[in-house]
Image (cartoon, grey):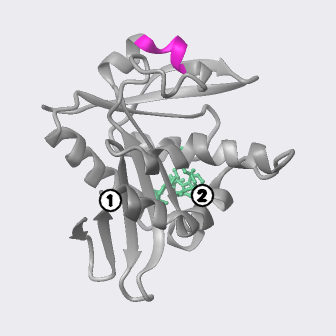
Amino acid sequence: MSTRPTSGRIAIEHVVPVSDRLALGPELDAIFFPASTTKSFPDETARLAFRERWLGRYLSSQGDHLLVARDLKADRRLAGYLVATLDNPGLTTRFADIGYFRSVADLTERFPAHLHVNLQEDYRNQGLGSELITVFLDVATELGCPGVHVVTSATSRNIPFYTRNGFANQRQLEWADHEIVFLGRTLSV
Ligand SMILES: CC(C)(COP(=O)(O)OP(=O)(O)OC[C@H]1O[C@@H](n2cnc3c(N)ncnc32)[C@H](O)[C@@H]1OP(=O)(O)O)[C@@H](O)C(=O)NCCC(=O)NCCS
């Protein structure tokens, strides 16, 4: 695990061993579920599948990445996390369950990596999400990745956050009956 202090208060840690990532599951769930726009599930199987799709698989896959932000002045409370992969979803079957990737194979060639970032509510709007993104972009650049993307709802409040962090709208498309946007940022490798 490597640690990068961002301010006197918050430290960002890159959690590498899969066993350490899996052990963080309950703490991550306490951020993931409240931050998700999907709030109810028909049954427990659907709830677990949702968690696996947007969080779990990045913890159990050795090559993926987990960054956690801990509050050093509040008993190392987990303030937020970022999960990501450098795997191009157009070249692997890992993400075949996410239908929109079939429509953006040309874009994922230029922006292969993707990420998901979520914070506890009381740590938002203080620049911490941007710090997590910056640390991940450094990791991806060091590993020779040419670009990173995120996909979010076309009406989401988080779009200005991504554009301020250098992501640009590459395409808007329809998925599961609503409009989504593919935002990409080139890395200088
Ligand atoms: C999106 C998020 C990671 C940004 O981190 P942050 O530290 O709050 O971001 P910054 O302080 O650097 O920038 C603030 C921006 O974050 C976004 N943001 C803040 N609160 C948000 C919320 N509840 N939901 C969505 N986006 C939010 C806004 O774009 C805001 O910019 P604005 O002031 O122009 O509206 C964080 O707010 C969050 O976890 N939001 C809820 C979950 C989410 O939307 N995750 C991304 C899924 S794609």
| Direction from residue 136 to residue 47 in the image, left or right | right
Q: Which x, y percent locates residue 138?
A: 20, 47
Q: Nearer the viewer, residue 5 or 181?
A: 5
Q: Which residue is mark 1?
A: 131
In the rendered structure, the answer to whether residue 46 lies left or right of residue 120 reads right
The alpha-carbon separation of the residues under discs 1 and 2 comes to 18 Å
Labels 1 and 2: the sequence-earlier one: 2
For residue 91: magenta? no
- For label 1, the SS is helix
Q: Residue at x 23, y 69 (%)?
A: 3
- Name the foreground residue: 25 vs 166: 25
| Residue under pointer 2 | 32
Disc 1 CB within 8 Å of nearest ligand 1 atom: yes
Q: Which mark is residue 166?
A: none
Kind of residue indicated by mark 1: Glu
Question: Is the C terminus in the top left, top right, bottom left or bottom right quadrant?
Answer: top left
Task: Confirm or deny contact between disc 1 and disc 2 (CB under 8 A).
Answer: no
Picture residue at 32% right of the left edge, 58% below the top: 17
- Please indicate whether residue 39 sits to the left or right of residue 109 in the image: right
Q: Position of residue 173 (x, y in %)?
A: 60, 18
Q: Locate residue 107: give its quadrant.
A: top left
Instruction: Examine the rendered structure and indicate whether residue 166 appears above or below residue 69.
Output: above
Q: Which residues are magenta?
A: 101-105
Residue lying furthest right in this view? Answer: 42
Q: Residue drawn at (22%, 27%), measured in percent from left and top?
A: 146
The kind of secondary structure the magenta stretch mainly shows is helix
Give the total of numbered labels. Answer: 2
Residue reaching furthest front? 19
